[in-house]
Amino acid sequence: MNQSPAIRLSGLRKTFGSLTAVDGVDLTVRTGEVIALLGPNGAGKSTTIDLALGLARPTAGTAELFGGDPRRAIREGRVGAMLQGGALLPTLTVAESVALVASAHKHPLSVAEALERARCTEIAKQRVSKLSGGQMQRARFAVAVVSNPDLLFLDEPTAAMDVEARRTFWLSMREFTDQGRTVVFATHYLDEADAYADRIVMLARGRVVADGTPAEVKAVVSGRRIAATAGFAWTPAVADELAALPGVRSVDQRAGQLSIVSDDSDATLRALLAAHDDLHDIEVTAHTMDDAFLALTESRDDAAHDAQSAQQQPQQSQPEGALR
C-alpha cells in the first residue's frame, strides 16, 4: 500500500483583501524529509505553514497532512509546531508548560525526555516570564516535541538565539530527524538551510520559485567567484581589460581586493595570471546560498514588475521572468 506523503499542498492560495499572501503553492513533502522554507519578508512562509496546519482557511486549494485533514493529524498527536506567535503561560515553569501540553496527548514523550531533547533541563524550573529570548525558543521546542510527533513545523526556530545556542539547537534537531521524522522549518539564516535541509523550497511573492537540494538551488547561479589581492592600480582601462577576459561576467574592486564572477573560472584564472602575475591571496569559490537567494527572489520581483508594466502598457511586449 502506498504511503501518503507527510504534506500535500495543492493550488494553495490565500488572500487578505487585495493582498495575496500565498499564490498557487503546490508542494509535496515525503515522510522523513527535512525541508527549509526560504524567502524574503512577506514571501508567504508563515502563511503557508498556517494553512498547512489548518490554522487558516485557504481562499483556494487544499492542504493535507498524512493524506487527510490537518486538524485530524494534530488531534492524533502526529504533528508538532513551534510558531512565531506561540505563547506560553508566563506563570508556569518550563517543565509545567511541557507537562500541560503532554497531558493533552495520548502517547507523549516523558516531560524529562522532551526537556532533554530541547536542551531545557537546566531551565526546567524557571518561570516562563523569566526566560531570555533564546531560552524561550528552546522551551517552545520542548513543547512542540513532547507529543512525540511524526511531523514538526518550525517557524524561525533559532530567532533570538546566539551562535552557540543555534549550534546546540541543530544538534538536538539532528537527533530528532535521525529517527525518520519529517521537519519543515522556515528561516532567515541561509547557512542553516544549506547545512541542515535535505531540500529547499524558496518562496517569493507567495509563489514557489525554486525547489530542490541545496546544491541544485545554488546551481541556478552559474559560474564561480575569483577573489584576489591586486598588486596593480585600478583604472577604467584595467577594468575594461579584466571584463574582456574569457568567461568573465562581472568585475569589482574594493580597497585593493579584486572580485571576478566567471562562467569558466579555469580559463579566466589562466588569462588573469598571464596578464597580472603580481596577484596574490587568490581564492576560487562556488556561489553561496546567499547568491542563489538574491538571484531567485530578484528574478521574481523583476517578473512581477514586468507583469505590472505590461498591464499598464498592453501595447508593449514585456520580457517574462527568468524563473517560475
Image (spheres, rainbow, N blue to C red):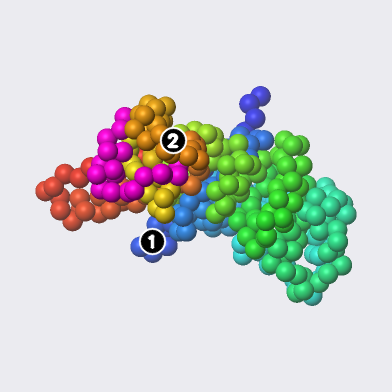
What is the span of residues highlighted in magenta in the rendered image?
A: 221-246
**Badge 1: how crowded within 10 Å, few (<14), some, or many (20+)?**
few
Which residue is at a point 63% across and 36% down the rendered structure image? 33
For residue 76: magenta? no
Compared across the picture, whether 70 is left or right of 18 comes to right
**Image coordinates for residue 110, horizontal then vertical, percent:** 87, 52
In the picture of the structure, the residue carrying the numbered disc 2 is 224
**Disc 2/disc 1 C-alpha distance (Å):** 38 Å
Q: Residue at x 34, y 48 (%)?
A: 233
Judging by the rendered image, the residue that carries numbered circle 1 is 19
Taking depth in this image into account, of 299 and 288 the one nearest to the observer is 288
Farthest left residue? 315
Instruction: Label 2: state its secondary structure.
Output: strand
305, 160: nearer the viewer: 160
Q: Along the polypeptide, which appears first: circle 2 or circle 1?
A: 1
Front residue (pair 178, 250): 250
Q: Label 2 amino acid?
A: Arg
Q: Nearer the viewer, mark 2 or mark 1?
A: 2
